[in-house]
Amino acid sequence: MKKTTKDFFVIGLALFAMFFGAGNLIFPPYLGKLTGSQFFLATLGFVVTGVGLPFLGILACTKTNGNFEDMAGRISKRFAVLCSIAIFLAIGPMLAIPRTAATTYEITIQPVFPWMSSLVSMILYFVLNLCFVLKPSKVIDNIGKFLTPALLITLSIIIIKGIVSPIGTIGDTGAVSVFSSSLIEGYQTMDALAGLMFASVITSSVLQKGYEGKDAISITIKSGLVAILGLALIYGGLMYLGAQTSNTLPNDISKTALLLEISSRTLGQYGGAVIGIAMGLACFTTSVGLITAGSSFFENVSNGKLPYKINAIVISVVSIIIGNFGVDKIVKISVPVLCILYPVSITLVGMTLFKVLSRNDSVFKVTVYTSLIFSIIETLPSMGINSAILKSIIAFIPLSNMGFAWLTPTAIALIISLIITKGKDNCSEKALEN
C-alpha cells in the first residue's frame, strides 16, 4: 500500500471514530420509521448535515491553520470567543454529554437494572467519568481503540441481518417535507459543531505526516471521504431498518426503545444486551473525551481563572441535572439551540471555503451576522415567543416553512455587501495567506 493511501486511510478511520458517537445512532432508525418508504430521501438529507457538514467544517479549518478561532476571528475576537464557548457548551454540558449519560441509562442500565433510578445512574456514571478525567489514564484510550471497531462490527451485523431477513414491511407513512426535515434532523448529531472544534487534531495529524499546502488539503479531502462513506453506510443502514418498523411498532415509541427493539429482532434475545453494552461503553469514552476537552477549553479561555479540575466537576454536575431529563427531552431542548448555531456555522464554513466571495471582511461580517439574526428570529416560536407579528414576519420569508428562513436573507446580505464593496479587498492577512 502506498504511503499516501495508507495515510489518508488511517486518518480517515480516525476521523470516523471522532464522529462515530454512539448517541447519534438513535436518530437514523427513528427518522427511518417516521419516513417509511421515503427513507432513501431522508438518508440523503440526514447525511448532508450529519456527515457532509462536519467534513466541510474541517476542510474550512484547514484554510485557517486548522483553527476555528482564526476562522471566526474575521468577525471579531470577541465573536470568536463567544461562538466557541456556545459551541463547546452545546457539545459539552448542555446537550451532548448529558445525552451520552441518558442514552447509557435507557439502553444499557434500565433494561438490566429496572429498579435503578435515572438520578442514581447519572451520579454513578459521572463519578466514574471523573475518575478518568481527573486522573488521566491510557485505559480509556485502549478501551476506545477496541470499542469503536467492535461497535462498528456489531452494527454491521445487525444491518446486514436486517437486509437479508427484514424485520417488517416498509410502508408509506405520509411524511411530508422529508428532505428538509431530515436536513434539520441531521443537526442532532452535533458533528458539524464538533468538527469545527476538533479540526486542529486532524490538521496536526496531516502536518505531522509531512504534508503541506495543497498536499495537506488533498489528504484531508481523501480522509474525509473515507469517514463520510463509513458514516453514510451506517446511518443509511440504520435508517433502512427503522423504515422496516413503520407498520409494526407504535409511533410513540422512544428513540432508544426503537433501537433496542431493532437489535432484539435482528440478533434475537441477546441483541438488546449486546448493543446496550457496546453503546454504553462507547458513550462513556465519548463523555470522558468531551469532559476533558471542555475542562481544558474553559481553563484556556479564562486564562487559568477556571481551573481544569473545577471545570470537570461543574460540567459533570450540570450534566447530571440535564441528563436526568431523558434522551427525548434533551433532544427537544437541543432543537432551538442547534437551529441557531448551525446556520451561523454553515455560513462561516461557506464563506471560508469560497474566499472569492469573502475577501472583504465587511462582507464576511454582514453575511454571518445576518445568518445569526434570522436564525434567532426563526427559532423564537419554538422558545415560546409566538406573537402574531413575529409569525407573519417568518411566514413572509422564503423557505421558512421548511425550517430555513435564515438562508434567503443571508444570501441577499451576501450579494448586496459584495456589490457595495466591489473591488475593495481588506481581508485579514492570515486569511489571505491560505
Image (cartoon, rainbow, N blue to C red):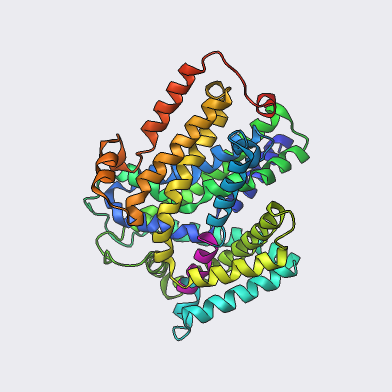
> Which residue is more in the foreground, 15 or 150?
15
| Residue 249 percent location from the top left of the image | 28, 66
Majority secondary structure of magenta residues? helix
Q: Please give the name of the residue rendered at 60% of the width and 52% of the height, measured from the top-left corner.
A: 18
Q: Position of residue 122 (x, y in %)?
A: 53, 75
Quadrant into which the N terminus falls:
top right
Residue appearing at x 29%, y 47% in the figure? 38
Percent x, y for residue 248?
A: 26, 64
Identify the magenta region: 94-106
* Residue 427 sits in quarter: top right
Give 306 or 95, whichever is nearer the viewer. 306
Q: Is residue 290 left or right of residue 167?
A: right
How many numbered marks, from 0 up? Answer: 0
Evaluate whether residue 14 shows in this view.
yes
Reply above or below: 315 against 300.
below
Q: Is residue 239 magenta?
A: no
Residue 105 lies in the magenta stretch: yes
In front here: 141 or 334?
334
Q: Work out whether 197 lies above or below 164.
A: above
Picture quarter containing residue 20?
bottom right
Q: Please give the name of the residue rendered at 63% of the width and 62% of the height, measured from the top-left corner.
A: 291
Quarter that holds the C terminus: top right
- Left or right of residue 16: residue 379: left
**Residue 222 in sight in this render:** no
**Foreground pick, 367 / 123:** 367
Q: Return the x and y of residue 52 as percentages of the image width and height.
A: 49, 40
Residue at 30% across / 40% down in the picture?
400
Residue 371: image quadrant is top left
